[in-house]
Amino acid sequence: MNKSDKILVSILLTILIPILILLNFSSSSNLAIVYYENNEILKIDLKKAEQEYEVNGYNGIVKIKAGNGKIKVVEETSKNHICSKQGYIDKPYETIICLPNKIVIKIASDSEYDATL
């Protein structure tokens, strides 16, 4: 490894380490919002114990499990069941988009800004 390689590695580490730290330690929100066709239909408090919710999607009922700071789609009516395969989300920058059912689940941000410097 020559001198220029060492400089490049140090620059990359200087940039990547703070980004990874911010992503791992970003605060989770306590509120999830469920939308159907861009209309807010449900707000879920994620601080509560796990509960199941049902909302009407384009193709039928969408079952959502939420609580203990996380949320996911458990069951839905669609051809490939992509929505229920996405798993849990718990960070404000994560979103579940269930396109066949026109359902979007977002974690509300604690901040009024999408990004900070």
Image (cartoon, helix red, strand yellow):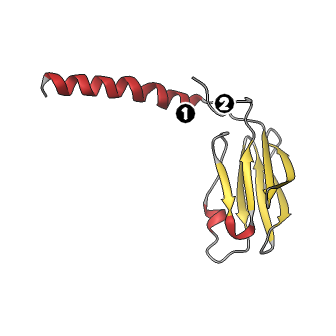
Image vertical order of residue 22 relative to residue 39, above or below? above
Residue that mark 1 sits on:
23
Image vertical order of residue 62 relative to residue 87, above or below? below
**Element on which disc 1 rests:** helix
| Residue drawn at 74 percent across, 31 percent down | 110
Q: Which residue is most to the bottom?
A: 79
Quadrant of residue 93 within the rendered picture: top right
Image x and y of residue 77, in percent: 73, 74
Residue 61 shows in this picture: yes
Residue 50 shows in this picture: no
Residue that mark 2 sits on:
27
**Along the line of sight, the residue nearer the viewer: 25 or 93:** 93
Decide: few, some or many residues near mark 2? Use Cα within 10 Å; few <14, some 14-19, many ≥20.
some
Give the position of the N terminus as an image quadrant.
top left
Q: Is residue 16 left or right of residue 44?
A: left
Q: Amino acid at mark 1?
A: Leu
Image vertical order of residue 66 relative to residue 97, above or below? above
Give the position of the C terminus as an image quadrant.
top right
| Residue drawn at 54 percent across, 28 percent down | 22
Are discs 2 and 1 less than 8 Å apart at CB?
no
